[in-house]
Image: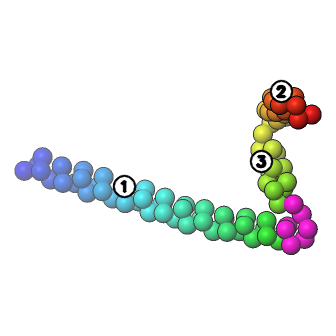
Amino acid sequence: MADDITTETSETVAAGQLRAFIERVERLEEDKKTIAEDIKEVYAEMKGNGFDTKAVRTLVRLRKKDQAERQEEEAILDLYMAALGME
């Protein structure tokens, strides 16, 4: 009888934890959706002010990388462009 109560309590606790995790993920997904919409609005505003949003997106992506990583990427790109006669 005591084992049945312990098992039932464990299952209830596990179900409660699972529900809490799922609810946290759902809230974070909603936050992510809101942030993505905000970012989209900022890019639209930039475009409205005459900025090239493709170039800005590239700059944002590059700023996330450290200098060594950017230099390595640029060196490889230069090498590939030279191989294709695109200099």
Percent from the top left, x then y, of residue 78?
Answer: 86, 31
Q: How is the image coloured?
A: rainbow
Residue type, mark 2 in image: Ala
Amino acid found under the numbered disc labelled 1: Gln
Q: Is residue 31 magenta?
A: no
| Spatial separation of the CA atoms under disc 2 and disc 3 | 25 Å
Kindly identify which residue carries mark 3.
Answer: 61
Residue 62 picture location, percent across and down: 81, 44
Q: Secondary structure at mark 3?
A: helix
The verdict on residue 48 being magenta is yes
In the drawing, does residue 20 fall left or right of residue 36?
Answer: left
Residue 75 seen in render: no
Depth check: 9 or 79 in front? 79
Q: For the point 24% across and 53% down, which residue is it?
A: 11
| Magenta segment | 46-52
* Left or right: 73 in relation to 50: left
SS at circle 1: helix
